[in-house]
Image (cartoon, helix red, strand yellow):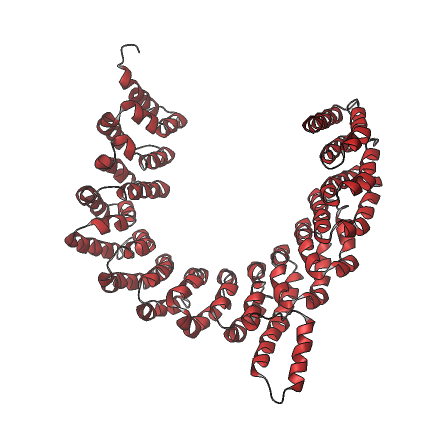
Amino acid sequence: MAMIDEPLYPIAVLIDELKNEDIQLRLNSIRRLSTIARALGEERTRKELIPFLSENNDDDDEVLLAMAEELGVFIPYVGGVEHANVLLPPLETLCTVEETCVRDKAVESLCRIGSQMRESDLVESFIPLVKRLAAGEWFTARVSSCGLFHIAYPSAPETLKTELRTIYSQLCQDDMPMVRRSAASNLGKFAATVESAHLKADIMSIFEDLTQDDQDSVRLLAVEGCAALGKLLEPQDCVTHILPVIVSFSQDKSWRVRYMVANQLYELCEAVGPEPTRSDLVPAYVRLLRDNEAEVRIAAAGKVTKFCRILNPELAIQHILPCVKELSSDSSQHVRSALASVIMGMAPVLGKHACTGLNLKSSHFVQKMSKVKAVACSPIPGLTWLEQHWDATIEQLLPIFLSLLKDEFPDVRLNIISKLDQVNQVIGIDLLSQSLLPAIVELAEDRHWRVRLAIIEYIPLLASQLGVGFFDDKLGALCMQWLKDKVYSIRDAAANNVKRLAEEFGPDWAMQHIIPQVLDMISNPHYLYRMTILHAISLLAPVMGSEITCSKLLPVVVNASKDRVPNIKFNVAKVLQALIPIVDQSVVEKTIRPCLVELSEDPDVDVRFFASQALQSSDQVMMSS
C-alpha cells in the first residue's frame, strides 16, 4: 500500500468499492464522489473519474440513481461551466437505461447542467445529445429526450430551432405510447420557450394530434397541456383552440381522461377566461358531477367551491346546487367525503356574493328588511335579489350540511366539522344553534374517537360564536364528559379545551362554570382520570392567575400528593413545578417546597426523580429572584 502514489489512493478505493459484491459499499462510494473529486482535483476528475463512471454504468438501479443525482451538482468539481460538457456522456448513457426513476433523475441532472452551460457549449454539445437521444433505437432514449427540449431550444440558432420543432413533432407521433406520453407531458415546458409565431403554427398542430391519440394515457396528459398552452395563447386563440378540446375531453370515452379534466378544471377555467367558462364549461362541469364513474365524481366534487367562485350566484344556484344535492346522497362514500371537504366553502361564496358588506346573518337584519318591504309602495329589486340568494344559501345548503353531518361514514362527518366556521359566517348564530347543534351533540358522543376529537377542537370556536349563555346550556356538560373519556387523546384534548374556553370567556366565568366541576373529578376512582384533572389544572393555572391558583387549585394538587398511585404522585411533582412561576415566592416556600421534599423521599424512583427536578427548578427561581 505504501508503494501506491498518494493522490491515486482515493480513485483506487472508489474502483475497489464499485467492483465490490456488496451493493451498500458500491452505493456509499458513489455518494462520496464529491469528496473523491476534491481529492483528485479538477483536471484528474475530468480525465479519470468521469470516463471511469461512463464505462461503469451497468450496475443496480439504486447505484445508478445515486450516480445520476451526484452528477447533477458536479460542475464545480470539473472546473466550472466551461468544462460542464464533460458531464454529459455518463448522463446520456443513464438516460437510456430501463429503470424509469434513473432516467428521470438523469434528465433532471442534464436540465440542471444545461441551464448553467454557455450558449456555445449548448450548441456544440447539448443539442447534439438531445438529437442523438431523440433518434435512439431503444424507446427509453426517445422518452428521455422529450424532457430536454425546453433547455436546448432557446439557445439554438434559427435553423436548429426548426429542426428541433420537427423532431419534437415526430416524437409526438412515435410508434411507442411511452414516447408519446413523455412528449405530451413535456409539451407545456417546450411550448413556453417557442416563439409566438411558431406557437400557433407548429405547437398547436402537435397538440391537436396528441388530443386525438388512440391511447387514453396520452390524451389525459394532453389535458395538462390545455392549461399550460392556455396561459401562452391570446384569449381569442385560447377560446378557438383550447375550449373545444376541453369540452370534448369532458365527454371522452375513457374515464381517466374525464377524471383529469375534473381534476384540472379550475386551471382550465383560468386558461379560457370567465365568459367561456360560464357559457361552455358549466354544462361540461355538470356532466362531470353526474358522471357514471365514482372517481370522476370525486375529482369534480372536490372542485365545486373553486368552480362556484368563477360563476355568478344565479348560475351556481341554477346549475351547480342541484348537482351538489345529488352528490350529498351519492352511493360512494368517497364522493360524499370529497364533497364534505369543500361544500362548507360554498356558503361564504354564495352568501358573500349576495350580501357583500351586509350582515345578513342576524334575525335583526331579517326584521329590518321586512319593515322596509312593508312600507315600500312597490317591490325593491335589490332587497328581493338579496333575499333570494340568502334564502338559497340557507334553504338549499343547510339541509345538505345536515345530511352530511349525519353520514354513516366518519370521514364525511370529519370533513364537515373541520369547516363549520365557514358556514357560520353566512348562516349565523340563530340558525346554527337551531339546526347544527343537534348534529354536533350527536357527533360529540360518536363511537369513533377521531370524530369526537375533531369536535373538541372546534368547541372553543363554536362557543365564541354561540355566546356564553347558549354554551352553558347546551355544550358545557359535554366538555366535562370528555375529561372522563376512555381514549387518552380525547382526555388530553378535553383538558386543552377547558383552558381555551377559560381564555375565551374569562377567569370569572371559568371560576363559576369550569373550576368546580374539574376539581370534583380529582376524587374519581380511576387513576387515569385523576391524572387528566392534574393536567387540566396545570393548563388552567396560567389563565386563572395567582390568586385563584393559590386558593382553589394548589390545595387540590397538594392533597393529590398523598395518592396511593405513583403515577399520580410524580404528575403532582410536574404540576407543582409548573405552578412555581405563577404563585408568590412565599407560597412556594410554605406549601410547594415541603410537598416536593416529601415526594423526593418517596419509595418510587420516578416520583423521587420528578420531585428532585421540581426542587431544582424551585432553587433556580429563588436564585434568579
- Tell whether 588 sits left or right of 154: right
Image quadrant occupied by the N terminus? top left
Q: Is residue 468 above or below residue 376?
A: above
Q: Which quadrant of the figure has residue 103?
A: top left
Identify the residue at the far bottom of this view.
377
Number of marks drawn = 0
- The one of 273 and 589 positioned closer to us in this rendering: 589
Residue 376 visible in the displayed image: yes
For residue 442, above or below residue 242 = above
In the rendered view, tell whether residue 558 sits above or below residue 354.
above
Task: Give percent across and percent down for residue 525.
Answer: 84, 39
For the question of whether residue 177 can be seen, the reply is no
Seen as rendered, the residue at the extreme left is 159
Locate residue 241 relative to residue 276 in the image: left or right.
Answer: left
**Residue lying at 35% horizontally and 43% vertically, measured from the top left:** 100
Could you tell me residue 361's position as x and y percent? 65, 69
Residue at x-position 59% and y-position 84% = 380
Q: Quadrant of the C terminus?
A: top right
Vertically, is 192 above or below 544? below
Q: Position of residue 5 (x, y in %)?
A: 26, 14
Which quadrant of the view contains residue 226?
bottom left
Q: Position of residue 272 (x, y in %)?
A: 38, 67
Which of the 4 image quadrants contains residue 105?
top left
Q: Residue furthest top?
A: 2
